Image (cartoon, rainbow, N blue to C red):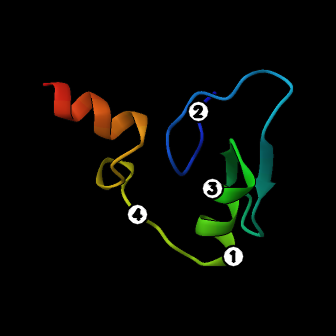
Amino acid sequence: MNCSYCSKQIRPGTGTMYVSRIGAISYFCSSRCYTRQIELKRKLNPKEIRKSVAAVKQQKK
């Protein structure tokens, strides 16, 4: 399972699952990702974040 914000892989038994009022399920690897997406309402593309897994894969291509 991957983090909804930074697309980092989440190990079993760790992370947070957030269910919104409309029933959408989001998984977060850390409180940092949860805070940025839910509390600060940032909806960034993970490829725009330099340290994310998706950005690193895109740079290698």
Q: Secondary structure at mark 2?
A: loop
Q: Amino acid at mark 4?
A: Leu
Above or below, 30 relative to 1: below
Q: Secondary structure at mark 3?
A: helix
Neighbour class for label 4 at 10 Å: few (<14), some, many (≥20)? few
- Where is residue 35 shown, x and y percent of the image? 68, 67
| Left or right: where 5 falls relative to 44 | right
| Left or right: where 49 falls relative to 19 | left
In the figure, residue 39 lies in which quadrant? bottom right
- Residue drawn at (50%, 46%) of the image: 6
Which numbered disc covers residue 39? 1
**Residue carrying label 3:** 33
**Residue carrying label 2:** 2
**Residue carrying label 4:** 44
Q: Between disc 1 and disc 3, whose residue precedes?
A: 3
Q: Amino acid at mark 2?
A: Asn
Q: Secondary structure at mark 4?
A: loop
